[in-house]
């Protein structure tokens, strides 16, 4: 038997654009010979192989991804509490059960940041509006005054108080005064930028939150109330009222520069609301009741008709705070292990909610106590 | 004849003055307007939008004041409770925290975006600025300002779960299910709520275990 021999031929006309090697019988004339079937079969085989390789590769990638995902889930689940693990492994777990991870992760992120910052770095955060919104306090009442509880809801407030309490009282007072000065400056600079934007075409738009400034100032005054007397608190509030009045006058004098409603709405961002001012004064007076008992009794008399509620104010490092959205929406008990402080908070009665004049009269009556004594 | 002319002239002047007053009242942004605020998320901005509506579109009634809608009374005591009627439509334009005018910035979508981010889950239905958490939980289509009369007249503090109030005492949610597979049968199994002008958010809890609570009110 004569062994069959092969030679290589090129078949560019069969596979245009490709340099394909075709094996033909040694005796065949040219590349177009039908004996080149081997090459065609080979190409078909390679096409199948390619498909097979792609399918196999895709499968490997898919399996890798699934394994990676499972590994990731496993890692996350090991970080959860035993209780959550027990729930998730239970076949009875309802399909719509809410995950607390989103909320708790946000809270833990805030705790971690606050724990690492120095006093100076914390002070810079005073007018960051986000801290007052998350967890935040959202009253169901319309036209309600929320500033005081928004201040309490910010974990930064409790963290700053902790930091100041580590200092000697005099130093803490100086620090709190410095925070007030800083926030007054921020408030004024921001309002100035906003007014310039409307009054001078082409002026840059303001990007600092006016609410953040206002609440930052309220926080600073609240801290000051812990280390100074109530007179200092009243002075800071009057200082605020002084420049916001001047800005109001300026807006009124340049009315034509402002779109409709802007003139009216702008000042609503500037002053701490009346209820917050009442609470700040009442808190400061109560803190100093031992030194000035007569003032305390006069203040109580003015506020006799205003209802109060007791807030169990949790420490900044509490896993679940009084104001946490996690607590509010998922009914988790608040974490009292880091310490709590009971705060008495005044609230307008339902029939006073619309009566701005009556609210202002209460504040004026409080301020008169201080005027009488000075 | 001259006297008749004077009468006509006077009447014309009076009518003219009246028309002027009406026009001034209609175009003046400060006339009979009410300032309101709601929470929105627009792009990277999260915060309040302050806006103004005609006074007649956001009317508030104190406890004991007849609002003209008999449905806004307590079921048992027939007492009108403190609430508001918000009849303005969306969108509304207003000012944000930075002093920027947001044209049509208050919409269902921007309200939903804010509360979705805060709650961490998706809403059900549409944002509803005409009722708050109290109204939704207690079943009234208005903005309740003070639920104390409703709770006093129509509810008892109870361990049987129907309507729950969380320990913040101001926020209220419907309790839509209870865990009945453990000794403590009043543990919350599922809830439904809204916050201010938000849409509805539904939560369910694993049973046994469930959601803890501090105050449960049962209809009388």
Image (cartoon, rainbow, N blue to C red):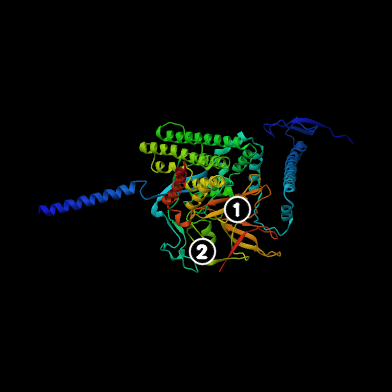
**Labels 1, 2: one chain:** no
Residue B88, image x, y percentages: 42, 53
Q: Quadrant of the N terminus of chain A?
A: top right
Question: Label 2 neighbourhood size at 10 Å, few (<14), some (14-19), many (20+)?
Answer: many
Q: Position of residue A287 (x, y in %)?
A: 57, 46
Q: Is residue B14 visible?
A: yes
Any part of residue A146 in sight: no
Say which chain tag 1 marks.
Answer: A
A265 and A124: which is toward the camera: A124
Of the pair A262 and A167, the residue shown nearer to us = A167
Element type at mark 2: helix
Numbered label attached to residue A92? none
Residue at screen point 62% across, 51% down: A326
Circle 2 sits on which residue?
B150
Locate residue A133: give its quadrant.
top right
Image spot of residue A47 (x, y percent): 73, 40
User: Which of the 4 image quadrants contains residue A18?
Assistant: top right
Disc assigned to residue A328: 1
């Amino acid at each position: 038997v004569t062994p069959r021999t092969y030679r290589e031929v090129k078949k560019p006309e069969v596979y245009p654009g490709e340099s394909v090697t075709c094996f033909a019988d040694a005796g065949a004339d040219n590349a177009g010979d039908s004996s080149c079937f081997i090459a065609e079969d080979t190409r078909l085989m390679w096409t199948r192989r390619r498909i097979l390789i792609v399918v196999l590769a895709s499968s490997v990638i898919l399996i890798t991804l699934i394994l990676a995902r499972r590994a990731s889930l496993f890692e996350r689940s090991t970080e959860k509490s035993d209780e959550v693990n027990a729930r998730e492994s239970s076949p009875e777990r309802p399909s719509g059960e809410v995950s607390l991870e989103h909320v708790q992760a946000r809270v833990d992120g805030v705790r971690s940041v606050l724990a690492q910052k120095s006093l100076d770095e914390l002070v810079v955060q005073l007018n960051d509006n986000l801290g007052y919104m998350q967890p935040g306090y959202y009253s169901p009442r319309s036209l309600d005054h929320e500033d005081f509880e928004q201040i309490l809801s910010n974990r930064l407030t409790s963290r700053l108080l902790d930091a100041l309490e580590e200092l000697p009282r005099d130093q803490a007072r100086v620090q709190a005064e410095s925070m007030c000065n800083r926030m007054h400056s921020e408030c004024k600079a921001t309002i100035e930028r906003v007014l310039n934007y409307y009054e001078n075409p082409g002026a840059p738009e303001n990007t600092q939150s006016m609410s953040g400034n206002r609440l930052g100032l309220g926080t600073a005054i609240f801290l000051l109330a812990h280390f100074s007397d109530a007179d200092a608190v009243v002075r800071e509030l009057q200082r605020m009222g002084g420049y916001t009045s001047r800005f109001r006058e300026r807006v009124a004098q340049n009315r034509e520069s402002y779109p409709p409603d802007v003139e009216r709405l702008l000042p609503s961002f500037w002053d701490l609301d009346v209820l917050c001012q009442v609470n700040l004064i009442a808190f400061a007076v109560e803190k100093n009741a031992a030194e000035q008992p007569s003032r305390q009794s006069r203040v109580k008399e003015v506020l006799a008709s205003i209802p109060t509620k007791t807030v169990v104010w949790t420490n900044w490092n509490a896993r679940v705070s009084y104001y946490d959205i996690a607590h509010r929406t998922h009914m988790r008990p608040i974490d009292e292990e880091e310490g709590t402080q009971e705060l008495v908070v005044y609230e307008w009665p339902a029939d006073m909610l619309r009566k701005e004049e009556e609210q202002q009269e209460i504040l004026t009556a409080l301020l008169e106590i201080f005027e009488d004594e000075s | 004849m001259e006297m008749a002319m004077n009468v006509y002239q006077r009447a014309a002047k009076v009518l003219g003055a009246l028309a002027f007053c009406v026009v001034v009242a209609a175009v003046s942004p400060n006339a009979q307007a009410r300032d309101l605020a709601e929470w929105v998320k627009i792009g990277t901005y999260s915060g309040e939008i302050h806006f103004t509506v005609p006074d007649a579109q956001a009317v508030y009634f104190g406890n004991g004041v007849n609002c003209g809608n008999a449905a806004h009374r307590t079921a048992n005591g027939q007492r009108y409770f403190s609430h508001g009627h918000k009849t303005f439509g969306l969108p509304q334009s207003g000012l944000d925290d930075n002093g920027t005018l947001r044209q049509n910035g208050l919409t269902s979508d921007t309200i939903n975006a804010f509360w979705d981010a805060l709650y961490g889950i998706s809403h059900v239905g549409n944002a509803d600025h005409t009722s708050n958490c109290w109204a939704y939980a207690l079943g009234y289509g208005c903005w309740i300002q003070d639920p104390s009369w409703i709770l006093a007249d129509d509810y008892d503090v109870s361990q049987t779960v129907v309507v729950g109030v969380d320990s913040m005492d101001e926020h209220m949610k419907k309790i839509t299910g209870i865990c009945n597979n453990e000794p403590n049968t009043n543990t919350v199994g599922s809830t439904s709520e809204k916050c201010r002008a938000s849409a509805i958010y539904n939560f369910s809890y694993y049973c046994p275990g469930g959601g803890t609570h501090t105050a449960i009110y049962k209809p009388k």
